[in-house]
Amino acid sequence: MVAHDFDDIKELLEDFIGELRQTNKSSGTIDTYSRDVKYFRAYLVERDLPTNTRALTKATIGDYMEHTLTRTNQRTGKPVTPEYAHRQYRSLQACRTPGKADSGSVHTDRCPELFD
């Protein structure tokens, strides 16, 4: 039997997607948020950083945003735009904060101070 870490970003993303569907968000919105959160989790895994939300810090999110701003767009080969990086941040914020993108997320008790 595999133990689940219910504070892992992967588990929370599943809940968040369900909440977005329940509030009738468009498939494009759901796909965007899902993809952006998965990119963040992949970043953490690639660097052997914890993916448990209780272990996240503002510094970790800041490092991810800096990484995002300094890489190239995988599709175009051009530098990532500040708007793209901002969308990445908003996707993470929406996953964590009630009322953002009208998500009504219930996960704010896990690390609300990260986006204050």
Image: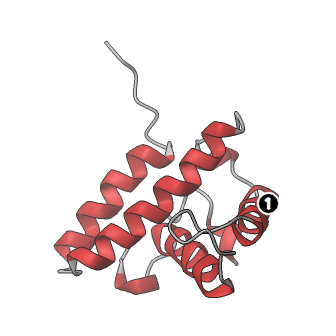
Of residues 73 and 46, the one nearer the viewer is 73
Q: Is residue 64 visible?
A: yes
Of residues 64 and 98, the one nearer the viewer is 64
- 46 on left or right of 92: right
Instruction: State the image coordinates of residue 27 (x, y, percent, origin top left).
Output: 22, 74
Residue at label 1? 63
Q: Is residue 105 visible?
A: no
- 63 on left or right of 24: right
User: In the rendered image, which quarter is residue 52 located in?
Assistant: top right
Of residues 104 and 8, the one nearer the viewer is 8
Q: Quadrant of the C terminus?
A: bottom right
What scheme was used to colour the molecule?
A: secondary structure
Q: Residue at x 72, y 60 (%)?
A: 64
Q: Residue furthest front?
A: 77
The amino acid beneath tag 1 is: Asp
Q: Residue furthest top?
A: 1
| SS type, badge 1 | helix
User: In the rendered image, which quarter is residue 34 located in?
Assistant: bottom left
Q: Residue at x 79, y 67 (%)?
A: 66
Q: Residue at x 55, y 80 (%)?
A: 87
Q: Residues within 10 Å of mark 1 (few under 14, many from 20)?
A: few
Instruction: State the image coordinates of residue 50 (x, y, percent, origin top left).
Output: 66, 38
Q: Residue at x 52, y 65 (%)?
A: 108
As drawn, 68 above or below 4: below
Q: Quadrant of the N terminus?
A: top left
Instruction: State the image coordinates of residue 54 (x, y, percent, origin top left).
Output: 63, 47
